[in-house]
Image (tube, rainbow, N blue to C red):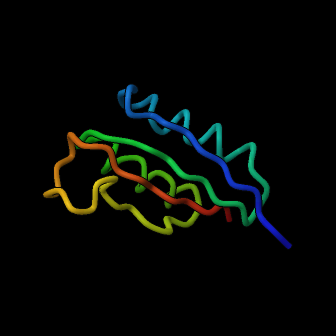
Amino acid sequence: MTTAQYFIDITGDVCPLTFVKTKLLIEKMPVGATATVRLKGAQPLDNVPRSVRAHGHEVVSLTPEDVQAAPDPRQPHILIVRKC
């Protein structure tokens, strides 16, 4: 069985819209599917993964888009989530 892949870019959004848009995407996904969420900013980097977990889904990873750059919340990060 293969799982569908989903993507959303919320780098231009601010909280609470960042999680609202992520939640709407997750709701469309079948159980077991993964989504790639592109986000940036201190609040989204803290709030979105926490809220995903609080809603019962798995945070697979959260990494800077440019893995060679110094950690900086102002730079885009890639969040991978799995719907549970």
| Residue 57 vs residue 2, the one in the foreground | 2
Q: Is residue 59 above or below residue 12?
A: below
Residue at 21%, 46% (x, y): give it: 73
Left/right placement of residue 36 relative to residue 70 reads right
Q: Quadrant of residue 28?
A: top right
Which residue is the extreme one toward the bottom? 1
Residue at 28%, 54% (x, y): give it: 66
| Residue 8 vs residue 15, the one in the foreground | 8
Which residue is the extreme one toward the left? 70
Residue at 55%, 59% (x, y): give it: 81
Q: Position of residue 5 (x, y in %)?
A: 69, 54
| Residue 67 vs residue 47, the one in the foreground | 67
Q: Quadrant of residue 2?
A: bottom right
Q: Is residue 77 above or below residue 19?
A: below
Q: Position of residue 45 (x, y in %)?
A: 32, 48
Q: Position of residue 4 (x, y in %)?
A: 76, 56
Quarter of the image with the N terminus in it: bottom right
Q: Position of residue 32 (x, y in %)?
A: 73, 66
Q: How many marks?
A: 0
Quarter of the image with the C terminus in it: bottom right
Q: Is residue 3 above or below residue 75?
A: below
| Residue 77 vs residue 45, the one in the foreground | 77
Left/right placement of residue 21 relative to residue 75 reads right
